[in-house]
Image: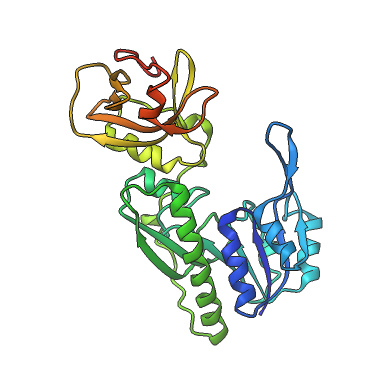
Amino acid sequence: MRVVFMGTPQFAVPSLEALVQAGHQVAGVFCQPDRPAGRGNRLVCCPVKLRAEQLGIPVYQVERIRSPQGLEALKALNPQLCVTAAFGQILSRENLAVPPLGTVNVHASLLPRHRGAAPIQWAILMGDQETGVTTMFTDPGLDTGDMLLKASTPIGPQETAGELTQRLSQMGARLLVETLEAIGRGDCPRTPQDPGLATYEPMLDKAMGRLDFTRSAQELERWVRGLNPWPGAWAQMEQGTLKIWAAQALDQTFPGQPGQVVVSSPKEGLTVACGQGALKLTQIQGPNAKRMDARAYLMGKALPVGMVLNG
């Protein structure tokens, strides 16, 4: 098929590569414009742009694909079908009307659960035991279109959002190729979503990373995994921000208020009391310090028993 691909982050790269490897003609790639990043605020291009250029595919970067400029660029490519994967923009009815075979989206959840922009993270945050990828026909709603194919996978007990994203990106690429093969044969299943089973969660922001130690240790452990690598879990202390990269929930109860350090030594590590149970912080990053094992951190820095995080 003659396809136009729309995607931005690393999650979308395997899907783009899979289309090319399967023999589809990718006429063009749309992705978000370059953004300033880092201390120098230098413009950085997204992973999809980098890979598309390596593959020799024309790249189109428009602030809004719904704009007249974006729509005309899409029409000029004359695609039979469009594919989106973590594109980061909402297509208009006019955009969706361009490809005669429709627009297929690769969504990283088992729809209709976890619609929205951060389905991988929210699957971990909400304690799901499994997740997966759904291909769907895009409609004017937000992840509301008819479902095509699905693939599921268990979520590992210690798996972070970053690790799960890598696995689902590969699953999504394989499922996308299967979906386009089925569409080409004319036998692809098409199942409307049940709105009664739908969940929609908000986008992530840095403020969400502040751990609320009045919650249970089990929930906070998921919070640390689900927000790794971004926006990251953290707690405030007198010296500054303590980033928490890995943690383990303990059933053991310690005397002390939520957020209070109850164990702190290079031998035993760092443990904080919670509303229920306690959270052992296993990998941390102090102010102006490197990410490291908590026991190694405590060999050079003191986080005394009794101090209260986010106090």
Which of the 4 image quadrants contains residue 38? top right
Residue 10, how many percent across, how many down?
Answer: 59, 55
Residue nearest the observer in this picture, 23 or 102: 23
**Residue in view at x 78 percent, y 65 percent:** 58
Q: Residue at (61%, 68%) from the top-left corner? A: 17
Residue ID at (42%, 18%): 301
Relative height, residue 92 to residue 160 (above, below): below
Q: Name the side, left or right, on which 87 lies relative to 131.
A: right
- Of 15 and 106, the residue lying toward us: 15
Colour scheme in use = rainbow
| x and y, in percent, of residue 276 in the image | 23, 29
Q: How many numbered marks are there?
A: 0
Side of 96 relative to 289 (left or right): right
Q: Is residue 138 visible?
A: no
Residue 2 horizontal/vertical position (percent): 69, 77
The quadrant in which the N terminus is found is: bottom right
Q: Give the quadrant of the C terminus.
A: top left
Q: Is residue 247 left or right of residue 111?
A: left
Q: Is residue 299 left or right of residue 47?
A: left
Residue in view at x 72 percent, y 49 percent: 45
- Residue 97's spot in the image, x, y percent? 68, 68
Residue 167 can be seen in this image:
yes
Position of residue 310 relative to residue 130, above or below, is: above
Q: Is residue 190 above or below residue 168?
A: below
